[in-house]
Amino acid sequence: MRSWLERASLLALLGLVSSCAAAIPTLDEVNEAVLTLRGYPDWAWALGIVAIWADLVAPVPQTSVIAALGIVYGTLLGGLLGSVGLVTGGLLGYGVARAFGRGLAVRLLGDAPLARIERFFERAGM
């Protein structure tokens, strides 16, 4: 009989593995991304980075784009290009949220619900 700690650890590991399964690109997604990038040999690196940035507004399979960058440029350079795309995309998303987030939240929610949410976070923290 397993202890409760072993069972909890096994459940946590199972949950982690199952949550990561959605991020694994399919072979068709990667093939399509590789073919697209190879169609623009001089600008494939820029197209890959812009595709990663596009995930801010559209459901782009980033893992497929990063895998395709690795296939086209090799592990080291492709990984570096994918990292540049992810980091700059995160910074871009942060900048957009910082510049327009509050105004958009007021427009979507209104002043009273937003004030209630802010009071909650002041009390409970992030």
Image: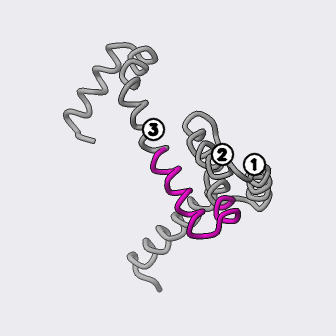
**Crowding near pointer 3: few (<14 within 10 Å), some, many (20+)?**
some
Q: Is 100 part of what is drawn in magenta? A: no
Amino acid type, callout 2: Leu
Residue marked by disc 2: 47
- Element type at mark 1: loop
Which circle, 3 or 2, is nearer the viewer? 2
Q: Residue 29 at x, y = what percent?
A: 75, 54
Tell which circle, 2 or 1, labels the residue nearer the N-terminal end.
1
Highlighted magenta segment, given as a residue range = 67-88
Q: Residue 46 at x, y = what percent?
A: 62, 47
Rendering quarter of residue 58: top right
Tell which circle, 3 or 2, labels the residue nearer the N-terminal end.
2
The answer to whether marks 2 and 1 mark residues whose Cβ atoms lie closer than 8 Å is: yes
- Element type at mark 3: helix
Classified by dominant secondary structure, the portion drawn in magenta counts as helix
Is 59 situated left or right of 7 in this image? right
Q: Which mark is residue 92?
A: 3
Q: Residue 121 at x, y = what percent?
A: 26, 34
Is 48 situated left or right of 120 in this image? right
Q: Residue 66 at x, y = what percent?
A: 62, 57
- Residue displayed at 53% across by 63% down: 15
Amino acid type, callout 3: Leu
**How far apart are the alpha carbons under marks 1 and 3?**
24 Å
Rendering quarter of residue 75: bottom right
Asked whether 116 or 75 is in front, the reply is 75
Asked whether 29 or 68 is in front, the reply is 68
- Residue displayed at 19% across by 34% down: 123
Q: Is 75 part of what is drawn in magenta? A: yes
The answer to whether marks 3 and 2 mark residues whose Cβ atoms lie closer than 8 Å is: no
Amino acid type, callout 1: Tyr
